Amino acid sequence: MVKSILIIAVLALAGLLLFAATRPDRFSLQRSIVIQAPPDKIHALINELRQFNTWNPYDKKDPAMQGSYRGPAAGPGARYEFKGNKEVGEGSLEITASTPAQVTMQLDMRAPMQASNTIDFTLVPRGDTTEVTWAMQGACPFVAKLMGVFINMDTMIGRDFEAGLASLKARAEKT
């Protein structure tokens, strides 16, 4: 009886590991919102990291987070190093490219697990509004694939993106 249970448990674990191995090697997710403000006003709230952190949902998750800014105040080379609680983690965010229509950032996490992801904010004028899309993509190592079997990362991170975009909308639409 014990031997049968052990064999079933080993087979179930092997099946789980094999299933996780078949998941994609890369991930991407995005959320969008329409904001009643011109692109240049929104761009300033993304392209300058001190402004970015006034609406960034991850900065709000840990009021005791330690952070420091390096490089220029805005645009390519602007960098933010952070160390927060387990929910936020530890890493850096750097603007790598910036045009009036898009800001690209590199997010390098050191904890709770190492990751290197690309973030793009795209601003598309739509009359007197702007459609803002927050997208992130990166590699999906085996541990992340295994976690993805149990946790829907798109839903979990997507909620944070939606909260951040709502906060960006509130700031940008203030007169």
Image (spheres, rainbow, N blue to C red):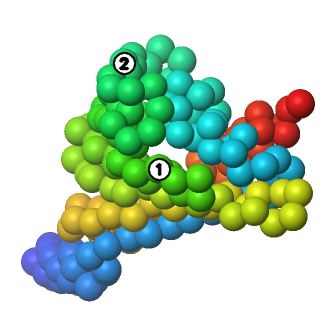
Report helix, strand or loop for mark 1: strand
Q: Nearer the viewer, residue 146 or 95?
A: 95
Quadrant hosting residue 171? top right
Q: Nearer the viewer, residue 89 or 102?
A: 102
Residue at mark 1 to residue at mark 2: CA–CA distance: 21 Å
At label 2, the amino acid type is Ser
Q: Position of residue 30 (x, y in %)?
A: 56, 65
Q: Is residue 108 left or right of residue 130?
A: left
User: Mark 2 highlights which residue?
Assistant: 68
Q: Nearer the viewer, mark 1 or mark 2?
A: 1
Q: Position of residue 131 (x, y in %)?
A: 73, 61
Q: Position of residue 91 (x, y in %)?
A: 30, 35
Q: Is residue 45 above or below residue 101?
A: above
Quadrant of the drawing holding the C terminus: top right
Identify the residue shown where x is 72% and y is 40%: 41
Quadrant hosting residue 125? bottom right
Identify the residue shown where x is 33% and y is 64%: 138
Q: Nearer the viewer, residue 153 or 133?
A: 133
User: Mark 1 highlights which residue?
Assistant: 98
Q: Residue 80 got which mark?
A: none
Task: Specify which label sits upstream in the sequence, 1 or 2.
Answer: 2
Q: Position of residue 174 (x, y in %)?
A: 86, 32
At label 1, the amino acid type is Ser
